[in-house]
Every structure is written in structure tokens, then in C-alpha cells.
Image (spheres, rainbow, N blue to C red):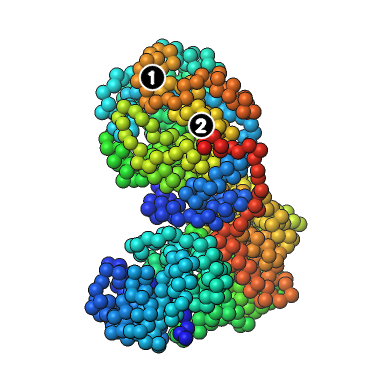
Amino acid sequence: MFTSIFNQYDWNEELRSIYNKTDAEVRRALARKQRTLDDFKALISPAAAPYLEHMALLSQQATQKRFGKTIQLYAPLYLSNECQNICTYCGFSLDNQIPRKTLTAAELLQELLAVKAMGYQHILLVTGEAQQLVGMSYFRQMLPLVKQHFQHIAMEVQPLDEADYAELRARGVSTILVYQETYHREDYRKHHPKGKKSNFDYRLACPDRIGRAGIHKIGIGALLGLDDWRTDSFFAALHLQYLERTYWQSKFSVSFPRLRPHVGGLQPKSVITDRELVQLICAWRLFNGEVELSMSTRESPRFRDNIIKLGITSISAGSKTNPGGYAVEPQSLEQFEIDDGRSPAIIAQVIREAGYEPVWKDWDHALHGGEANGKFPLPEEIG
Amino acid sequence: MNTIDKLHYITHPLPDYPIAQQVEDVCRGGCSWVQLRMKEARTEERLAEALRILPRIRHYGATLIINDDVYAAKAADADGVHLGADDMHPSEARHLLGAGKIIGCTANTLDDVLRLSQYDIDYIGVGPFRFTSTKEKLSPVLGGEGIHRIVAAARIHGVRIPIIAIGGITPENIGGLLNTGIHGVAVSGAIHAAMDKVTACEAIIAQLTTGHPSLATDHRPPATHHPSPITDHPSPVTHHRPPITKKMNDILKIADKTFSSRLFAGTGKFGDHQLMENALLASETELVTVALKRVEHTGQEEDTLLRHLAHAHIQLLPNTSGVRNATEAVFVAQLAREALETNWLKLEIHPDPKYLMPDPIETLAAAEQLVKLGFVVLPYCHADPVLCKRLEEVGVAAVMPLGAPIGSNKGLAMLDMLRIIIDQANVPVVIDAGIGAPSHAAQAMELGADAVLVNTAMATAGDPVQIAEAFKWAVRAGRQAFLAGLPGEQSVASATSPLTAFLD
Ligand code: SF4
């Protein structure tokens, strides 16, 4: 379990070690073929700032070597904005007085068709945490619909138990994303004062449960800005390294959500600039040549257009971050503000102009093996 | 002119680690230069502390320097004083203390060094090397490069005063710092924050000594004098190893056991038990594998193999050499557990008598059963990354992929595969088979292997004892290089149009 490794590390010590990195350590990290966690620290440290262009170039090369000139496209679909948690940075937080909505099957179908019409075959289902309303029974009911229309299903929902993940996998879910938000235990408590999410350890162990359940791809990340982004990124890298070695049959992806303005109005503790975000993305790539790096529409068009050449491998486009946002109720309140509102078609064009191929489909339900294809009975069929 | 030590220990006020104990520990670790630093204290308090520790300092023949406080140094009759930028002027201190005492000063810049070098002082502390928690007043961090620049420039300007690097130095940094032309280092946290202070201190001294073999630490009291590690007739009693690896706690752990040597050895093919014993002792190995088929079950004879392996620091690792499938392996393993009274087992199954290639399918099956039977299983296997992960999943304690066909002495023929295995392993990786020369062993260690197992190359060498010792050094060198972080090949890349220009 990652927890036992995590507990051996001290936040302040890592923070200090990152800020103490020297020019020589950065240059050594740049020169190496295979980079260690310590090299990663050097590359995200302030000392690496002067080497940004060099890092970008190496990152571009490493990304093309593994992924070719391709960029995956996906769209988030919000199933519900119900949430029993208080998260200081989120528009859906329990203490925010907003209209709550959970898609019915009919509404979901409308949304699915709208997203599909934009060209997508990969979809990311998103919810808050409302175990009663939007729990496993809701997912059981909705997933067959989604599966009919999409070849790759990812979910970013409340942390679940291992058995639930195994069941989701059997129902056609290939990817689960769960972000730790921050690896700073005390600050985590501050930002998650109420609800199931306030249990730091349960969340920290979540990727382990996903891995054990044999989910094909696991996404992790930290919400940049909640705490020192460099230290949080170090812990995310430590997490990734552990997960890769333990669940060696899984794929991994990392995201870089930056704290954005929303109804609650939390001000970031450490602001990560565009330049630093590029540094961070390149550092990830130089640390790990295989991990997928993903970017949402929180970022500006100009930033996104350029970053696709620097290490990112998948981006969303035309996103709506409110349940029903695509077709049912386009005007409702979003979880976070979108910066890049351009349509997927335009984004695909941008990708092509950069010399890359936009990839809409990179998975097929057939790859799920027997279980998802009905060869083996699902739990309720046995029961 | 006073002689200045290579290692200075700066005391640090800690609630649960009194200064007197700090002094005792570092002196026992071989450090003979203590700087008493009590930033917030008054002169009387400093004086009292100095008088408290002086008898022990004298007992060890060490030197006591008082930080900041010339009056306390004079009153206690300490050996000297260390002055910060805001403390007393060095000339005034010299006047007060007289010619016989040591005066050291702190410098942050080249200008400081040049200015200070005009006075009658004995050494200059240049720093801070890194951010440090012991310095309340922070000056710009110099890093190894900054220190290098200052030292080099000072030398060009004809400064001959010994320069001591100071501020946040850890054992990891010392190797690099020694190349900057400094005379020595001053440390604090590197020792007081270590679990085992004495060992930490010894490790740093070993490093300072290895880096500069000519700078003998001859002032060390005989009580802590270590025998030279190179001896013709090593005996287990004197097998104290100066920890030369840069990480202090660089200890290999497999299952419940720890090893300070990363060289594992075999017992076959030596031709002479006494020669084997001598070689194993010279190698300083702590884990030796023995084929059960070679163990005499009577145990009565004068010259049995086991008698020659009976050394407290040597752990036996029975192996199943000779078996051809999982069933045989599990049977032999149980015999071995009884005969050698250990549940450790090197699992090797090679059905083919010609190349002795390990059988992956039988090995995986046997490993799974043996783990369930409570064995600590170290399987010998192909350099197959997926197989290694599968073995890991059934609970083996380490994996032992081959570097090349057994007995071939070809080195790391499976280099690319070994790299992947090491990269993704969650258990120690021991490179077994194929290591024919110390350079191969060093390469395996540089790659990040946790240990190597050497048999044929040692047993069949012209002089097995000499080769065993050569392997010992090679494994350490490789390990140290791995920990130090090898430089990569500089890839000179250039973009046609800058990729990050959009950020400007
Ligand atoms: S971040 Fe997630 S859990 Fe927290 S309030 Fe928002 S939707 Fe709920």
C-alpha cells in the first residue's frame, strides 16, 4: 500500500530539498537517460527555470518517441452536481447554495448523443460524492447506456471500494481518475472539513484499490495551488512510481488542474504561473516517458495550443462542467470556469495544424476481454 | 601555524540530545574538531558548557573552537574561536587570544575571502553550501559550484588559508565538494540528525579520506583507529568496513535480514575449501550460497564445506541446484531447511544439463509453493521482466535474474532487460550468473542492481583471494557511482523555433 511509503516522507523535508536543488543537479538531471525521483525534484525546482526551453525540447522528443504525433481527445460528462462534501475550492461543495441536478436516464442519453455528435468516442463521466443518489446502483443503471455509445469509458467519481471498482470494470469502465488534491495531510484536512472526502487515508489508498481491481488505466494528480505545487507534484510522482511498480499491468495518466476562480472563491496558496506549468509538464515527461499527460479546458486557448507540442498526450475540448450542460440545461452553473470554449472541431483543426493527429478512438470494448462482453456473468446475474 | 582538520562538527542545541553527548559521539566516531555553537546563549552559559565538555575533548585529543565568543574562548582556554560576519574583528580577536590560538572566519563571497585573508587567521569557512536550519541569518546559498568558484578564484589571488565548506552539508554532497579544492567540511545536522551518530561520523571521515587519500586523519586517537581495509589475511574479527558509500544507511534489506555487503558469493568450483574460505573472507561477503547436493549430512569430518563457512557474519543460502522441476525443488528445499537450519532458499531449477537454463514455468510454480511453506525465496531466473514481476507477485523476497548464461563470464549480456527489471522491481534485484570480471559487477551496480552474486569468476581465477577483494571494491565502486548519480550523455538539442516563446 502506498500509505506505508508515503508515511516515510516528510513534507517539509521534501519541500526544502526541492528548493535547495542546484544548477549542477539540474544539469545532471537533464543529461541523464533514465531519471530518478531526485532528478524530478531538480527539474521542478526553481533552479531548473533557466533550462525551460531545453526541457521543452527534450520533453517533445520523449513524447513523440513514445506516442508519435498524436493527441487524444476526450469530453467530460457531468452526471450530477450533488455532493455531500465540503471542499473549499469547489463550486459543487455542499455549502454552496446552487441548484442541484442529477441526470435521469433520458437526460443522460440526450447528453451522450450531443457529445457523440461532436465526434467523441472517449468519454469521462464525472460526479460529486453523493453515495445514495449517485452511487453504484445509479452507475449500474447508467453504464449500459454509455457503453452503447462510447468505446472508452473513464470515470472521475467518489472513491469506491475495491469490489465496486471490479464491478465497474466488468461493466465496461476502463479508466478511473482520482486526484489526491493535496498530499499535505494537514492542509488536506483544512480544505476538506466535512464529508467522506475528509478521510485523507481512504483517498490516498484509492489508487491501490483501483489497481487491485485490475482497472486498465489509473489517473492521479494534485490540484495545483492548494499547497506548494512543487512538493505536491513530487508526492504525485512518488505515487506514480509506486503504482507503476506495483500494478505493472495498468496504464497511468497524470493531470494538472490549476486552482481556478469559482463560486466559493478560494484563493490559491501558491500560484503556479504558465511558465512553471510548462516546466512541470516537461519535468513529468522527462521523469516518465510512458505516462499519459492530460490537460483540461481550464487553460487558455493560447496555452493549450502550444502545450500540445510539449508533452501533453490528451486534451478535452468543448467541455461543459455542469450536469446537462451539453444539451439538457446548457445554462446551469459549472464546477469550474472554462477558459478554452472552442469546439472540438476547432481544437482538432488546431491539433492538425500543429502537425499532430487528433485521435478520437484508441480503445474498443472488445479489448475488455470476456467479462465485459458477457462471457462471464455479472454479479446480479449470479445472485 | 595550526593544523586544521578536514571534518569540523558544529554543535547544535537539541532538547533531547545534550551537547556533551554530541561531543562524545562525534569524538568516538573519529572527529577531532568540535565547534561549540550556542547562538542565543550568554557568555557565562557558553563558558559553562565549554568547561563541561573540555575534559572529554582533551581526553580524545580533539580541538575545541568556540563560535562567536572570544571572551568565552579565552576564559575556557579553548583552542580557538570561530567568528561570523557580525562578530568581533579578527585582528581584535588575535590581540585578545594571542598567537597560539586558532581563529576561523565565515565568508559568503570571494570579496569576503580576499578581505579576510589579509588578517592573521587560520581558516575560512565558506558557505552556506545549502539552505540550513542552523543558521538563523540566511545568506545566499552557494551550492557546490559557488564554492568551487570562490575557492578557485581565491587560489588565483594567492590565498593559502585552508577553506572549509560550511552550511547544510550532508554526506551526499561531500564527494562533489572534495573536487572544489576545499580543505574540509563543517557539518552539523549530517551527524546529529543521523540515527547512528558514530557511524555517520565514521562514514563522513571515510569519505573525506577516500576522496583525498593523502590527507590522513592521523590525529585520530588510537582507540578509534580502524585497520586498513586491505589486508592479506583478513580475519572475520577485524572485518570492520569503513562505509564508503555516500548514503549512510545504504544497507541492503532482504526479507528480515540486512546486509552491508552487496556482494553475494557461491561456494562451487574453488577446488579447495581453505582457499574458498580465504576468498570469501577477502570478499567480505555476507551471503553465501551452498548447493544442498554438496552438503555432507554426517557433519563429522574435519574438512567439511560447512566448517569453512562458519563465520558469524556469513549467512548461508542453500540452493536447489540439480533439481529439474518444481516438485523436486520443493522436496530439496525442505531437506535444505533441515540440514542448514535456515528457511532462506535460492531456488534454481534447470532441467537442461548443458546450458543450465532456468525453467521459468517450474520456477514460478515452485516459488509460489515455497513461499506458502514459509521459505524466503530468492529465485534464479531469466532476465525476463514479466517473469520477475510474476515472481514478485507470488511473494519472493528478491529476484535473481541472470546477466548472461551461467558460467559464461560474459557480463551483462542481458543489459536492456536487466534495466527494465531494475526499474520496475519492488523487491531487491540480484544479478546472478554471467558476471565474469569486477568490471561487470561494477556495471551491474551502476545500473542500480541491489547486489550481485559471483561464483565462477571468483572460484576459477588465478588468485581467488585477490579477485574476491577486487570484486569487493568493484561492487562498492559501482554502488557508490549509482548513489552519486552518474552523469548522462549530454544530448545537444536545438529547436528550429523556440518551443516556449509563447510564454514571453
Ligand atoms: S471537489 Fe468533488 S467532492 Fe469536493 S465538493 Fe467538489 S464535487 Fe464534491
Say the numbered circle drawn on residue A175. none
Residue at the image position 35 percent from the left and 64 percent from the top: B134
How far apart, in angstroms, are the residues tagged by discs 1 and 2?
Answer: 26 Å
Mark 1 near mark 2, Cβ–Cβ under 8 Å?
no
Look at 57% across and 53% down and name the residue there: A27
**Subunit bearing disc 2:** A
Work out whether residue A257 can be spotted: yes
- Residue depicted at x 47% and y 67%: B111
The one nearer the camera, B277 or A92, is A92
Answer yes or no: is residue A136 visible.
no
Residue that numbered label 1 is attached to: A323
A266 sits to left or right of A231: left
Depth check: give the residue in front, B286 or B299.
Answer: B286
Instruction: Read off the residue under disc 2.
Output: A303
Residue A99 percent across, percent down from the top left: 29, 19
Judged left or right of residue A4, residue B305 is right
Ranked by sequence position, the earlier of labels 1 and 2 is 2
From this view, report whether residue B467 is shown above or below residue B433.
below
- Provide the chain ID for the residue under circle 1: A
